[in-house]
Image: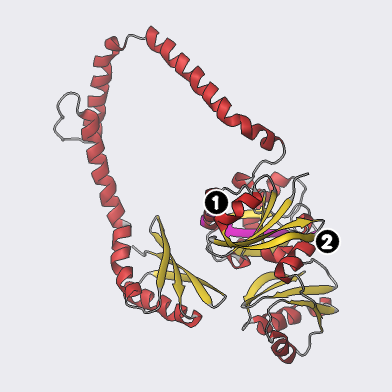
Amino acid sequence: MPRTILLRIDPTATDASWQRVENGQLAGSFHQGKLADASRHCRGAHVIVMVPSEEVFITNIALPGKNRKKLIKAVPFAVEDQIVDEIETLHFALSPAPADGQYVVAAVEERMMEYWDKSLKAAGIFAETLIPDVLALQDAKESWTVLLEADRALVRSPSGMFSSDIENLPFMLNNLHQQAGDEKPDEVVIYDCSKASHMTTLTALCSEIEFNVMECADGPFGVLARHYELRSSVNLLQGEYNRQQGLGRHIKPWIPAAALFAVWIGWQLVVNITALIDLGNKSEVLTEQMRSVYKSAFAGAKLPAAGYERSSMEAKLNLILEKQGQAQGSLQEMLVQTAPILKNVSGVKIDGMRYTNGKLDFDLTVKLSSDVEPLKEKIENQTGWEVKSNASTSKGVTKVRLTIKSSS
């Protein structure tokens, strides 16, 4: 049985922490570093990756029937009213089995799944399980579980699973407690791994909630490793991201050899078929067809010299595509308007950038979390474009993802 590695990545998937797990307990040494540094520890292991829950929408829903393929297809429409984003842009995943008639459903943007997938592959890590970190907490009816970290908290209850910044945690807990009605928990179990005085604030602002503070000797990793259960979690690697465990692992080493054999067979077929075809007899027919297509596609245009039909057609198509790109809001246009704004704001560092179909993502480092909203508003006011922000602070460093969508 392969060893198990618990791997936790930060919002940018560049930094990570990891440790070996045996029978639900931490073993070996705790490591922190770049994601690429974890590769040698993960080689040949069963890797469970925990991603930030801030990027994932999680809820419980009742679904009729037992056919899993049909259930997966029904999920987007069952939670559509609870989600702001277009369901076509989201990836959905379902818990292995229902608990009390309800499944745990997770939804995450396709671009985030692709980003995590590519980051892990680039680091040489083959992960078989990818879960939101909040779903590694204990799942219990009688009590709720809260994990306090330095600048964020994870909350798991039967009616809500989410992450929160420390400042908003009292409000979130009070609201969740009121909504529970007659199903209020006997207690809220707190694992205080923050090394700060957050419990004093929580006790004062959440006077109607009974807290039970537990030790956090092994840090957040110890809590998550001790309570993680696959059956009460959701593996995001479903559908097109399924790693095809088991048989696929044994087949994988033979894929290069099989590919070479297929190439050789294909080449032999091409050689034999080519020998039977007299290309010279078809040359004039193909040329005439190409000229006919050219006349149909570009009515009124002068026919190019013989032999130049393809290159001329490609040039005209490229010109059409360039014009369409300018009409939809090109990367150049978006950079011209946003770059001066970012440059003139002190304390902003650009860590990365991605552009897809009129949507521009900036990964930034800012001095203070309070700088995020003014920066977002400044871009919105000066460009008239839609701007979304997602910020997280760790060890005094605030990371921000700005998603700018062109309105043109």
Q: Are marks 2 and 1 in contact (CB under 8 Å)?
A: no
In this orientation, does residue 1 appear? yes
Image quarter (top left, top right, bottom left or bottom right) of the C terminus: bottom left
- Residue at 85%, 73% (x, y): give it: 142
The region drawn magenta spans 101-111
Q: Is residue 110 magenta?
A: yes
Residue type, numbered disc 1? Ala
Is residue 353 left or right of 369 when viewed as pictured?
Answer: left
Residue 45 or residue 315, whichever sits in front: 45
Q: Residue furthest front?
A: 29
Residue 179 in picture, x, y percent from top left: 74, 78
Residue 50 in picture, x, y percent from top left: 65, 60
Residue type, numbered disc 2? Asp
Residue 313 in picture, x, y percent from top left: 24, 34
Residue beneath disc 1: 123
Q: Secondary structure at mark 1?
A: loop
Q: Is residue 105 magenta?
A: yes
Residue beneath disc 2: 100
Is residue 275 left or right of 333 when viewed as pictured?
Answer: right
**Number of the front mark, 2 or 1:** 1
